[in-house]
Each structure stands twice: as structure tokens, then as C-alpha cells.
Amino acid sequence: MLQVPSTTAPTVHSLPSYLNADHLGPWGIFLKQVDRVEPYLGNLARWVETLKRPKRILVVDVPIHMDDGTVRHFEGYRVQHNTSRGPGKGGVRFHQDVTLSEVMALSAWMSIKNAAVNVPYGGAKGGIRVDPKTLSRGELERMTRRYTSEIGIIIGPNKDIPAPDVNTNEQIMAWMMDTYSMNQGSTATGVVTGKPVDLGGSLGRREATGRGVFTVGVEAAKHIGLEVSTARVAVQGFGNVGGVAGKLFAEAGARVVAVQDHGGTIYREAGLDVPNLLKHVQATGSVGGFEGAEVISNDKFWEVPCDILIPAALEQQITAANAGRIQARLVIEGANGPTTPEADDILHERNILVLPDVIANAGGVTVSYFEWVQDFSSFFWDEDEINARLVRIMKEAFSAVWQVAQDNKVSLRTATFIVACKRILHTRELRGLYP
């Protein structure tokens, strides 16, 4: 008998509990962001479940010998969200509050970020739940090397390329590269980016994320009639991202009036001495104790009169509880996921433009791409060329996102997701499913 195909819509299988949008944490925020963009995907919406399910999740035990002779176990993660457009790409963070939900969300935002600036990567992220300040240098090295060995089955120059993130740096990347290379039996400089220049790292990589924040911030300011040379800037987090961005804004004539980090919050209405503040942070580890500034409460930071606010610390800093008090005209997200969806809506209603993380802080991964390309070719560019290429890519990416936002009358975050999700899902459709 002839079987007539059913016209009933296919059933979408329910997500595992840890992938559910109601699950508290950063992953739930990402899922809500995808739900918001789905109506703009057209025929590609049939593939949207691809974005809601990480391709691969690896949870590893990281046992190490401590200096006192004991053995301690740490939990590590590497999540590959999507690899349709190329190898996974994303940082590794060492932090006592790292969770699977956080790493999943960060890997997904990397997918969006890489597609938004149109570099040939998918999204990935890693982390270990540890406070690295409690470890000696030897313990830190042993932990890094053991973690690298544990995730070595899924990383590689053509598979998944880690990079520095919170509490990791060039030295951590050098240990990761060496460990992977020893296990492979040959030197593989391209397995990580953000390495020391002497090991195949790229000039300009350390400052790239902050430079990208500044570049797209200037472009956004032009569109809302904000003059950067007279703007007041407040920065949360004053390391490689916030510190570099603050320095570049100050050099452009802006006044950095407030800075907050784990050491407290300082304020000076006439503007802080940014070069000396950077020296102070490098010497002491925080802005705490900096002379020539008023100390204010951490909560008051969100009420500081300013034109540009740069959250460049951790996730979920701007929430429904403080978004109504922010006085800036422009928020530039130097950190990953610093604004909750509820806060996003409040800022939008108050006509505060939010330049989202998935475009604003993409400078780091853009120069990581340059580093990866240079490692493959063994031909290295000078810093001026790298910075010029970075600025061009960031400006082009912002221009495309701005146009989509205007055409669809949506926020810059939704516009960035539209651009990125269409690129990812179009690639998924072209590749098809195997087998």
C-alpha cells in the first residue's frame, strides 16, 4: 500500500536538563539570545537547534601533586559549541567560579563572535575550577600540563585552538603548546594562540581585545553623535582589555573618570591619570590604593556620571538591579556576557546603546587568527600591519551589524546574532548531515 508522507511538523526532542533555557546561568542567557534571533533567520531557522546543542562537551579530572606532597583533584572543561565554519576557537580560564554552564555559554558566544567578524573558526572554550592565586608556580605548571594532556584528544591546530582568558596568559599557553607538542612528537606552535612572540606568538595580540573595544566604540560613538574627545569613560576591569581600552580612549582625549576591579572602585571627576594607574595596577595587582582618586563603593560605580561605560570583567555584571541607574549613553561590552537579557531590555528602553561583546571584544580572536595564519606559514607581520588589519576587520564587521540593526529595527546584539547565526547555519546547510 502506498505510504503517504506525514505533513505533521517534526517533533523537536526536549533538551537535556543542563541545556534547558530555565537552567540558571550563562547558558540560559545564550539560549534566550538565540530565541530572540530565530524570527529573523528565514528558511535557516530549520537548523536553529544546531545552535542550542554544543557539538562536544568534555569534562576532565585534573589530579596534580601539590608542593606539600598531597594530591589534589580539580575539575576541567573543554566545550566545542560549533565547528561548521572551521576549528573550534576560544580561551581557557582558571577561576574558582568556573562552571559547565559558563563554559558552554562562552563557547557559544565564541561561535557567534567568530562568525560576526567572519574569521574561519567555530566556537570553543575551556576552564578549570581553581583559584590560581593559591597555587605555586610549579603547581600551576603541573595543573596546566595535566589539563592539556586530558583535553589533548580533542584539541589541535586543525581541530580546536585554545587561547588565554581569565587568569591565563602567555606562559600558560607556552606550557600548553609544549605539552601538546611533546605528546604529538613534534613542535605544533599552532595548537594555541596568545603565545610568547619567541614561540610563534603574534605582535599586537596582548592589546588586541582592548584595541578592538576602542575601535568599534569610536565607530558606534559617531553614529549617536557622541564626541569621544570630550567623553567621560567608566571602566570595570583594568587588565588587558579594560586597561588597554581605557588607555586608548584617554589618548583620544576622553576622561577616564572611574575604574573598578577586584581591589575596589576609584573615581575622579576631572579624570584619572591613566598611565600612572596602569603602572600602579601592574605593580600592585589592582586599582586599590591608587593616590589622587576618591574611593567609592562598588555599588556606586553603576551610578557614576559618564558617557561611555565599559564592563570588562566577568559575566552578569549589568542586571535588572542596576541597569536603571546607569547614566552612560554607550555601553561597550569588553567582557563576555556582562549584561543579562533583562538588563538589555532596560537599557534599550532608556535609549542607551549597547555594543555587545560578540562584536566589541572580537579583536582578540581576530589577532589570534592572524597568529594562527602566521604559524602555518612561518612568516610574521610587523605590529603596524597587524593593527591596521585588525582595525579594518573590526570596522567592516561593525558596519555590517549596524546596517542589519537599522534594516530590522533591532538592537546591535540581535543584529550581530542575525549576521553570525545566518553565516553558521548557512554553512551547516551547505555541508549537510553525515551520514
Image (cartoon, rainbow, N blue to C red):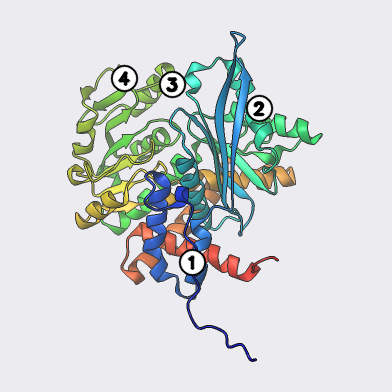
- Which is nearer the N-term, disc 4 or disc 2? 2
Q: Which residue, given by chain and number where applicable, does mark 4 sit on?
A: 288
Taking the image as shown, residue 315 lies to the left or right of residue 119, namely left
Q: Nearer the viewer, mark 3 or mark 1?
A: 1
The circle drawn on residue 282 is 3
Q: Give the camera-side residue of 283 and 34.
A: 34
Give the class, few, some or many, for how many residues have Cα within 10 Å of label 2's Cα (few <14, many ≥20): some
- Which is nearer the N-term, disc 1 or disc 4? 1
- Which is nearer the N-term, disc 2 or disc 1? 1
Q: Nearer the viewer, mark 1 or mark 4?
A: 1
Answer yes or no: do the residues labelled 4 and 3 have beta carbons within 8 Å?
no
User: Real-space Cα distance between discs 3 and 1?
Assistant: 52 Å
**Circle 4 SS class:** loop
Report which quarter residue 202 is drawn in: top right
- Which is nearer the N-term, disc 2 or disc 3? 2
User: Real-space Cα distance between discs 1 and 4?
Assistant: 52 Å
Furthest residue toward top: 68
Can residue 27 be seen from the camera position used here? yes
Q: Which residue, given by chain and number where applicable, does mark 2 sit on?
A: 146
Quarter of the figure with the C terminus? bottom right
Q: Which residue, given by chain and number where applicable, does mark 1 sit on?
A: 12
Taking the image as shown, residue 324 lies to the left or right of residue 141, namely left
The three-letter code of the residue at mark 1 reads Val
Q: Nearer the viewer, mark 4 or mark 3?
A: 4
Answer yes or no: do the residues labelled 1 and 4 have beta carbons within 8 Å?
no
Q: Nearer the viewer, mark 2 or mark 3?
A: 2
